[in-house]
Amino acid sequence: MSLRNLSRPISFLYPNLSKVYNSFRILKMSSASNQYETLSVSVPKEFIYHVELNRPDKLNAMNNTMWLEIGKCFHALDYDENCRVIVLSGAGRLFCAGIDLMDAANQGIEMGEQNDVVRRAKVLRKYITQYQNSITSLEICKKPVLAAVHSGCIGGAVDLITAADIRYCTQDAWFQVKEVDIGMAADVGTLQRLPKVIGSDSLVRELCYTARKFPAEEALSSGLVSKVFKDKESMLQGVLSVAELIAIKSPVAVQGTKANLVYSRDHTVQEGLDHISQWNQMALQSDDFAEATVAAATKNKDVVFAKL
Ligand SMILES: CCC/C=C/C=C/C(=O)SCCNC(=O)CCNC(=O)[C@H](O)C(C)(C)COP(=O)(O)OP(=O)(O)OC[C@H]1O[C@@H](n2cnc3c(N)ncnc32)[C@H](O)[C@@H]1OP(=O)(O)O
């Protein structure tokens, strides 16, 4: 009897688990459907999900609905067993123009309803925390996220892609940490993640203090993106090929790798080693490890892993 079969009787011991399973099933069904107003989610190939920012008329500017839907979508994909890897791109002529400046005015109106500084601060805390959580949902999601950027990637869009696992862009792409231009310090991830993505602290500070546009070639040389493609079409093809390579691997191995890379980025080497030791005490008992090891030893390239 395999370990997977052994775990089945446990559901009889915990009848409430069926409710939990059912809610996961709803997530599973809903994550690829067109339930979003500002995102388009499709499945171009088995196990590969494509999330498109979808407000092309507004250059995919992130209004409140989009911020919340990003969090909701990546949470759903985290639990969707049919999803193993996610491609993130923008519909229309530009990847994303950052926060929707018109929509953000509503936050000012909501604050204006409060007479007291602490109560106004509470309104801001709600938005800042919600938007931080939306961006962080890409990182919490155990499925690798591959960002594909064309044309402009501005302000909040830089926060978004720095939370992705891998970034690609087109020749015509440009990036801008725009926040100082609208009188604010970036507060939803760029200042925390960009220094860990780009090796040069000096360059990060230059980009963040000046808000200057930087082109695809600089994104490549600084390590922000892995590769530059001729145009959007070839980029999506290329990114899909990378996604296919990831999708055929053991999801136990890939998701464990992501979780431990993220953990190790923020901890000492020894803490990271302790974490993977604990992790693998569980993960190495999974069917995937046995199946992948046998496949490697027998040069069998057709091993199919169970969903996760
Ligand atoms: C708690 C908050 C945390 C988050 C903070 C985030 C901060 C940031 O994101 S700072 C960066 C904010 N973004 C910008 O400053 C960019 C503003 N847009 C532009 O400068 C130009 O649109 C751009 C250079 C990107 C493109 O110019 P182009 O001439 O090619 O197009 P436009 O005619 O300007 O735009 C087309 C329509 O899109 C609307 N739009 C573009 N960007 C935004 C935006 N950020 N917010 C709202 N709407 C945007 C633009 O109004 C046009 O709409 P319409 O007039 O209805 O055709």
Image (cartoon, rainbow, N blue to C red):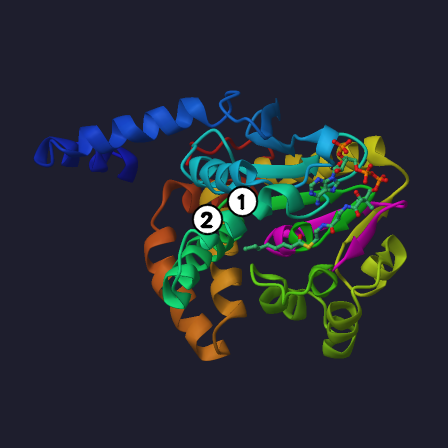
Count of marks overlaid on the render = 2
State which quarter of the image contains the N terminus.
top left
Q: Residues within 10 Å of mark 2 (few under 14, many from 20)?
A: few
Residue 95 percent location from the top left of the image: 74, 40
Ligand 1, what quadrant?
A: top right
The circle drawn on residue 54 is none
Residue plotted at (19% across, 28% down): 18
Residue plotted at (67% across, 51% down): 166
116 relative to 229, above or below: below
Depth order, front residue of 277/268 = 268
The amino acid type found where label 2 is placed reads Glu
The circle drawn on residue 106 is 1
Q: CA distance from mark 2 to mark 1?
A: 6 Å
Residue 124 percent location from the top left of the image: 46, 58
The amino acid type found where label 1 is placed reads Asn
Per the rendered image, the range of residues in magenta is 159-177
Identify the residue position indicated by label 2 in the image: 110
Q: In the picture provided, is 6 more to the left or to the right than 261?
A: left
Q: In the picture provided, is 278 more to the left or to the right than 20?
A: right
- Verify whether residue 160 appears in magenta: yes
Residue 207 percent location from the top left of the image: 78, 68
Residue 227 percent location from the top left of the image: 81, 50
Q: Residues within 10 Å of mark 1 (few under 14, many from 20)?
A: few
Marks 2 and 1 close (CB-CB < 8 Å) = yes
Q: Quadrant of residue 244?
A: top right
